[in-house]
């Protein structure tokens, strides 16, 4: 089993939870122009010029829709269905172990990861930013999300061991927070 392929898949599907099309575009471009990622059938369809063009257009639409007040809320509602699907595609296409892991399991993992990241973003982070800044912080946060999605997608393919380190640190942080919360006396 290719463990680095799993880390790539986790990173790419988490990235899809922030922006559905960026990780798919990164996969398509890297598979088309480099040997960093090899897509097996049917995922190799992502390297088609038509699909790459479509992903560029969809990326631009999502980029601009997420920057316009009110439209960004409609976009997030629509993306509730698209981001988990994109995460499923990213996970299944990039998990070099697709022959060893049942495709349904890979797709399910991608849906859960991208859906979880999207849920945290749209139900916790964005409403907090909107409330705290009166909506003024939404555009910078959206730009930061797009930048993070792009960086995470590239890192997931080029340096998947870094994704493993991030997962370990994030898990340790969550465990530490939960332990700290339990050990503090209730006031």
Image (spheres, rainbow, N blue to C red):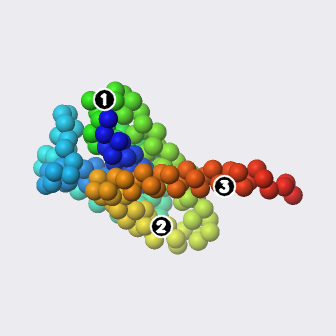
User: Mark 1 or mark 3: which comes first in sequence?
Assistant: 1
Quadrant of the drawing holding the C terminus: bottom right
User: Mark 2 or mark 1: which comes first in sequence?
Assistant: 1
Q: Does residue 117 appear anywhere in the picture?
A: yes
| x, y percent for residue 14 | 42, 49
Which residue shows up at 13% across the image and 46% down it?
48
- Name the front one of labels 3 and 2: 3
Secondary-structure class at tag 2: helix
Quadrant of the drawing holding the N terminus: top left
User: Mark 3 or mark 2: which comes first in sequence?
Assistant: 2
Which residue shows up at 53% across the image and 54% down it?
170
50 relative to 147, above or below = above
| x, y percent for residue 94 | 28, 43
Mark 2 and mark 1 in contact? Answer it, CB < 8 Å: no
| x, y percent for residue 7 | 37, 46
Assess disc 1: are there few (<14), some (14-19) or many (≥20) residues with their C-alpha within 10 Å of its C-alpha.
Answer: few
Q: Does residue 9 appear anywhere in the picture?
A: no
Picture disc at residue 100: 1
Picture disc at residue 156: none
How far apart marks 2 and 1 lie (CA) works out to 38 Å
Q: Mark 3 points at which residue?
A: 177
Secondary-structure class at tag 1: loop
Q: Name the residue under label 2.
A: 141
Image-based side of 67 in relation to 170, left or right: left
Which one is in front, 44 or 163?
163
Mark 1 and mark 3 in contact? Answer it, CB < 8 Å: no
Which one is in front, 68 or 55?
55
Assess disc 2: are there few (<14), some (14-19) or many (≥20) residues with their C-alpha within 10 Å of its C-alpha.
Answer: some
| x, y percent for residue 117 | 48, 49
């Amino acid at each position: 089993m290719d463990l680095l392929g799993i880390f790539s898949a986790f990173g790419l599907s988490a990235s899809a939870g922030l922006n559905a099309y960026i990780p798919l575009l990164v996969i398509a471009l890297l598979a088309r122009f480099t040997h960093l990622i090899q897509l097996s059938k049917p995922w190799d369809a992502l390297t088609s010029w038509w699909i790459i063009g479509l992903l560029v257009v969809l990326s631009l639409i999502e980029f601009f829709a997420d920057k316009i007040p009110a439209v960004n809320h409609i976009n997030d509602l629509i993306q509730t269905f698209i981001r988990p699907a994109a995460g499923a595609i990213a996970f299944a296409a990039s998990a070099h172990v697709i022959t060893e892991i049942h495709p349904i399991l890979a797709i399910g993992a991608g849906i859960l990861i991208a859906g979880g990241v999207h849920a945290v973003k749209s139900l916790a982070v964005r409403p907090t930013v909107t409330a705290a800044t009166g909506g003024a912080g939404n555009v910078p946060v959206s730009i930061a999300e797009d930048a993070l999605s792009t960086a995470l997608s590239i890192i997931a393919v080029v340096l998947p061991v870094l994704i493993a380190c991030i997962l370990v640190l994030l898990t340790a942080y969550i465990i530490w927070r939960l332990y700290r919360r339990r050990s503090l006396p209730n006031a």
